[in-house]
Amino acid sequence: MAWRSGGSTNTSLIDNLLRNGLLNSPSLAAAFKSVDRAHYAPTDPYADSPQSIGYRATISAPHMHANAAEALLPYLKPGGKVLDVGSGSGYLTRVFAEMVKPGGKVVGVDHIGELVEMSIQNTRKSEEGAALMDSSVLRFLRGDGRIGLKEEGPWDAIHVGAAAKGLHEELVEQLAKPGRLFVPVEEESGGQWIWVVDKDASGKVTRKREYGVRYVPLTDHPGERT
């Protein structure tokens, strides 16, 4: 039903995701409605399809963002801490910030400096986004998100927005107790699968392979490749 979920406005897009069962949480729906995707997607922002944002990166289709947010929902609470690896244009990072305010912290990390600047500019297109940044609820940093951001952890939720080569144990180690990691992983066969990694209150880690997906790879900056 994903291909039928696009709309003519931000509200109609989210309503269609709800109608088609691709988004279920009322609190998440309210957060998505409060963030205009047109500020983050360069063309046809309300279509339920991925779009290029330059630098060999994409903004994922809205139904994929909905899936990721639903998977992390138990950990997206006011006062929570979220790390968004491969934050791209900043869209889902901004939605996460809506979920953890007041008192929370969301950090978007991307190794492409131009995308970090883009995400800051995109977020400041709205007064609400600018206020979240000015109050340090939401920040964007350039860095290698594959190794996490240990100095600011532990993290209640970690989202990875591109296909990784593995589960990156550095990210698992930086999960809070309890905490959850959502990451698409490219397997040796060439396929990609969503993995959800949970750490419980005692520190026990459970890894679950969920469903097949197609993401762009989590890679180096195009100009940094050798």
Image (cartoon, rainbow, N blue to C red):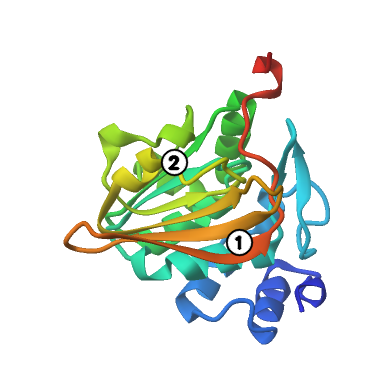
Q: Give the residue pinned by disc 2.
A: 168
Packing grade of label 1 (10 A; few <14, some 14-19, many >=20) is some
In the image, 77 versus 38, the foreground residue is: 77
Identify the image quadrant of the N terminus.
Answer: bottom right
Sequence-first tag of 2 and 1: 1
Q: Is residue 201 above or below residue 38?
A: below
128 to the left or right of 135: right
Q: CA distance from mark 2 to mark 1?
A: 21 Å
In the image, 104 versus 179, the foreground residue is: 179
Q: Position of residue 184 (x, y in %)?
A: 58, 53
Query: Which residue reaches farthest front?
Result: 189
**Tag of residue 65:** 1
- Secondary structure state at the residue bearing disc 2: loop
Residue at 49 percent across and 80 percent down: it is 26
Query: Which residue reaches farthest left?
Result: 202
In the image, 88 versus 40, the foreground residue is: 88
Amino acid, disc 2: His
Amino acid, disc 1: His
Question: Mark 2 or mark 1, which is nearer to you?
Answer: 2
Identify the image quadrant of the C terminus.
Answer: top right
Q: Position of residue 15 (x, y in %)?
A: 67, 80
226 to the left or right of 97: right
